[in-house]
Image (cartoon, rainbow, N blue to C red):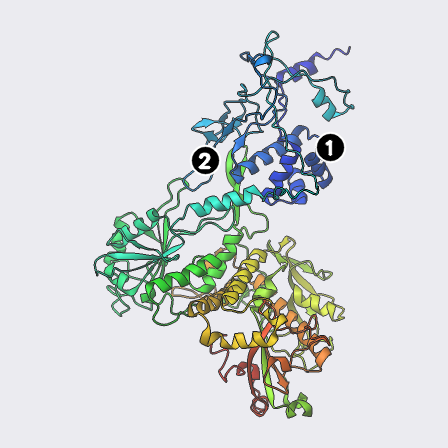
């Protein structure tokens, strides 16, 4: 024997080691899947390979040392955040520390020989918001290890992560049959380690796993097999969040029919009495009623209640009409009620606060949070123009009930309105990808980033910022210095219009459905700050801005150039977003970037935003009688249904449709919001720059993707039909046609199907609809005058002036 007393003393001095308990391998995999984590990202966080994690989840290997500790903490944290009820599971061997009271098992004769084994079920304490209550770690009552969770105020672990000191309602384990010795190795050594009994004379009670039900076997029987279980965690937190708001997302307040008091019209059609005659009382009533909307992401925030005040309700609550007296009236120039007004003073006196915007058309009234409880109410005041602009196009003469239904439908499909549709579109991005989440560390719970989200505000690259930005000071103009990724405004030169095209009787306009929204799907964008690089090798997987000379790319002049907003051929080096350069490579160009501003942390940030708005758009079109598959099955019926929308469609659903489209377009525009409002100094920073979602590079990538997608379809259409557009405005193209229908332009295969990759009729984002038709002589006259016919193809109106 080697005499190493120092080493032995060091081991003894370190104290007894405890093996971190882990749930069953199948439960480990289920927790990860329910939490929405991939094997790759989980393995990366734990500092192991994906193969090692797979072995841990399959039970082929047993984690050891620091890796085991980290894995146990991750699994316990996931179970806690999923909010699942806890049950005791088989504890792994734990060496007791200090004296342990003996546990007397029931006699073997008293134990049942068959039947289910009872489990001890523990419900953890929750906050009013439904989240698990967290406290300073204290020793668990069952295993003695620290835990931040409580059950009825007592410290206790999630089941499966601790070994209870006393097992109840379980039968003693029978003597195990001799098993072959495990193979040498750390896992085998752990399995072979003896369990220290509390006392030599007392048998030890054990906790047995309930028998796993046998897997159903396919037979000729008609017996129905059990359905596949849905991910419980995803359902649980969503249902718990929804249950907190029984009154729905909003209420439209109006004067009662009796003329005395107020009533609230809810989104589901219910009418409730309002307990309050002043603004502070109404705000308190809204919070007590259970108004609000469940969060759209596990780590996001629930939607605040929205109160919409009709003109009569606003007057009853003492709010003035629009006027010129800045001390008593609501003045459009300041867009807020003066702080000296009695309505604002009443809120302050009652302990409520307003944001820096003050009491305006869209106001937020809140109290300083008390612990984790959030007290905040949003106000919408149409009397002051809240719903007269900003993407909201409401039918005239709406009563309170209809307004509640309209806004409630938008809230259900998109988001509770927070202001203009553009503001709501931007807020939707954050609601679906919140920047932070709670992270448990050695010192307790802290805030950590949510993977795939925009976590902090970062400055854009100098070529990407607008002229008002401080980084643009002293910057030269032109594409060689400024990133100009904008939508098309192009008309074909008159001398490039052939005689056959001029002979056609009509010009037909085709408009792409929600082009920017379609471009956002699966788009890889930068999540980090830009890095400047000289003479980089182009990589289509790196989002950013590239200084490249694409002037030598030879394309058909009857199509707009995909590299410039004007559609003209570039004349030298210019800054382009990654999608534009990637398309140049697709067209055969050899690109040699001179420099670039690149972002090496990437992800499809807009994916959930795209999915939710796409679903909202498709659902609304279906409610209007235009299902997703109508165009493919019956193109004529699709065109007829679209033509009848304005006259026969439900006015409320039409208003929702307009709002959804404006939300998608405006949300992208908000990524590059320019300074506005009083008190701004030239060259200074403005409030939008301090938010993580001020990202002009992402806006540029979306617009570039929409433009090159459109060019790809125009090119494919030309290859199959020989038709080229006479003009393009953003997402609308005008073609010479033998008839006045979209079917006179769109290509079809010999069996009548749409040509893959070409312009295609349909409801889906990225497909096209009929925009309008004009006599060909009128369009030719526009071209001779240098006008873009796509601007006027819809009933002769200026599409830009109409806000389209």
Residue 463 at least partly seen: no
**In which image quadrant can residue 27 be found?**
top right
Q: Give the percent coordinates (x, y) of residue 684.
A: 46, 62
Does dot 2 land on a helix, a strand or a loop? loop
Q: Earlier in the sequence, mark 2 or mark 1?
A: 1
Instruction: Work out how far the residue at label 2 is from the one at label 1, CA to CA, in angstroms.
Output: 35 Å
Q: Is residue 464 above or below residue 68?
A: below
Question: What residue is at 27 percent from the left and 56 percent from the top?
Answer: 344
Q: Residues within 10 Å of mark 1 (few under 14, many from 20)?
A: few
Percent x, y of residue 492: 63, 84
For the residue pair 654 and 695, the one nearer the viewer reads as 654
Taking depth in this image into account, of 281 and 629 the one nearest to the observer is 629
In the image, 282 versus 443, the foreground residue is 282
Residue 611 seen from this side: yes
Locate residue 12: give its quadrant.
Answer: top right
Give the structural element (helix, strand or loop) at label 1: loop
Relative to the observer, which residue lies in front, 63 or 67? 63
Q: Position of residue 438 (x, y in %)?
A: 51, 41
Picture residue at 33% right of the left edge, 46% below the top: 288
Q: Is residue 109 above or below residue 47?
A: above
Q: Is 524 situated above or below 482?
A: above
Residue at the spot of label 1: 60
Instruction: Return the residue at label 2.
Output: 133
Residue found at x 72% / y 40% = 49
Rendered location of residue 594, percent (x, y): 70, 65
As drawn, which residue projects farthest toward the front?
221
Q: Kindly identify the residue that appears in the image at 56 percent across and 56 percent down.
A: 608
């Amino acid at each position: 024997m080697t005499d190493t007393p120092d080493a032995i003393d060091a081991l003894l001095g370190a104290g007894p080691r405890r093996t971190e308990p882990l749930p069953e391998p199948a439960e480990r995999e289920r927790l990860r899947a329910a939490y929405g984590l991939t094997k790759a990202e989980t393995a990366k966080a734990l500092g192991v390979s994906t193969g090692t994690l797979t072995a841990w989840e399959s039970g082929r290997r047993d984690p050891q040392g620091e890796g085991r500790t980290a894995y146990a903490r991750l699994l316990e944290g996931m179970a806690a955040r999923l909010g699942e009820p806890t049950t005791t599971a088989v504890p792994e061997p734990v060496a007791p520390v200090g004296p342990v009271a003996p546990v007397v098992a029931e006699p073997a004769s008293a134990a049942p020989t068959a039947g289910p084994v009872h489990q001890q079920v523990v419900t953890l304490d929750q906050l009013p918001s439904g989240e698990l209550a967290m406290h300073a770690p204290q020793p668990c009552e069952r295993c003695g290890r620290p835990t931040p969770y409580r059950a009825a105020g007592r410290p206790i672990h999630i089941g499966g992560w601790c070994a209870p000191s006393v097992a109840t309602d379980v039968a003693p384990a029978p003597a195990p049959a001799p098993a072959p010795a495990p193979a040498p190795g750390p896992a085998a050594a752990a399995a072979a380690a003896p369990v220290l009994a509390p006392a030599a004379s007392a048998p030890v009670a054990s906790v047995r796993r309930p028998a796993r039900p046998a897997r159903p076997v396919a037979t000729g029987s008609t017996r129905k097999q059990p359905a596949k279980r849905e991910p419980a965690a995803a359902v649980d937190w969503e249902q718990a969040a929804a249950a907190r708001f029984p009154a729905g997302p909003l209420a439209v307040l109006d004067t009662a029919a009796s003329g005395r008091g107020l009533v609230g019209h809810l989104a589901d059609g219910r009418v409730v009495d309002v307990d309050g005659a002043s603004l502070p009382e109404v705000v308190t009533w809204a919070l007590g009623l259970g108004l609000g909307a469940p969060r759209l992401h596990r780590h996001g925030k629930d939607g605040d209640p929205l109160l919409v005040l009709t003109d009569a309700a606003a007057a009853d609550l003492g709010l003035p009409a629009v006027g010129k007296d800045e001390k008593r009236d609501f003045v459009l120039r300041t867009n807020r009620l003066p702080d000296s007004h009695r309505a604002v003073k009443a809120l302050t006196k009652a302990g409520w606060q307003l944001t820096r915007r003050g009491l305006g058309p869209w106001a937020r009234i809140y109290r300083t949070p008390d612990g984790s409880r959030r007290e905040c109410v949003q106000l919408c005041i149409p009397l002051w123009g809240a719903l007269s602009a900003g993407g909201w196009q409401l039918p005239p003469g709406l009563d309170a009930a209809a307004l509640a239904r309209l806004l409630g439908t938008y809230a259900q499909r998109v988001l509770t309105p927070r202001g203009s549709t553009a503001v709501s579109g931007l807020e939707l991005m954050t609601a679906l990808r919140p920047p932070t989440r709670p992270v448990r560390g050695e010192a307790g719970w802290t805030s950590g980033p949510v993977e795939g989200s925009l976590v902090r505000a970062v400055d854009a690259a100098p070529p990407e910022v607008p002229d008002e930005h401080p980084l643009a000071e002293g910057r030269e103009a032109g594409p060689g210095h400024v990133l100009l990724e904008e939508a098309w405004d192009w008309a074909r030169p008159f001398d490039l219009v052939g005689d056959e095209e001029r002979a056609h009787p009509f010009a037909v306009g085709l408009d792409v459905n929600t082009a920017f929204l379609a471009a956002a799907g699966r788009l890889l964008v930068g999540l980090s700050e830009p890095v400047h690089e000289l003479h980089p090798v182009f990589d289509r997987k790196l989002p950013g801005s590239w200084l490249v000379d694409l002037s030598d790319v030879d394309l058909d002049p009857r199509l707009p150039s995909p590299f410039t907003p004007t559609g003209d051929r570039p004349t030298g080096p210019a800054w382009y977003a990654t999608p534009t350069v990637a398309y140049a490579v697709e067209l055969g160009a050899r690109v040699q970037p001179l420099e670039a501003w690149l972002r090496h942390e990437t992800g499809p940030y807009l994916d959930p935003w795209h999915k939710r708005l796409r679903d909202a758009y498709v659902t609304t079109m279906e409610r209007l009688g235009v299902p997703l598959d109508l165009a493919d099955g019956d193109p004529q019926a699709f065109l007829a249904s679209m033509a009848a929308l304005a006259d026969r469609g439900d006015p409320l659903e039409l208003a929702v449709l307009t709002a959804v489209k404006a939300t998608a377009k405006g949300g992208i525009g908000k990524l590059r919001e320019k300074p506005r409002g009083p008190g701004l100094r030239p060259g200074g920073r403005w409030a939008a720059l301090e938010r993580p979602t001020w990202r002009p590079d992402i806006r540029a990538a979306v617009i570039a993707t929409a433009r090159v997608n459109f060019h790809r379809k125009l090119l494919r259409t030309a290859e199959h039909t020989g038709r080229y557009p006479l003009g393009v405005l953003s997402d609308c193209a005008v073609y010479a046609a033998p008839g006045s229908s979209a079917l006179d332009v769109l290509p079809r295969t010999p069996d009548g199907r749409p040509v893959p990759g070409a312009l295609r009729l349909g409801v889906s984002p990225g497909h096209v609809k009929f925009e309008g038709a004009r006599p060909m002589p009128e369009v030719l006259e526009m071209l001779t005058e240098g006008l873009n016919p796509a601007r006027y193809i819809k009933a002769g109106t200026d599409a830009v002036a109409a806000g389209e």
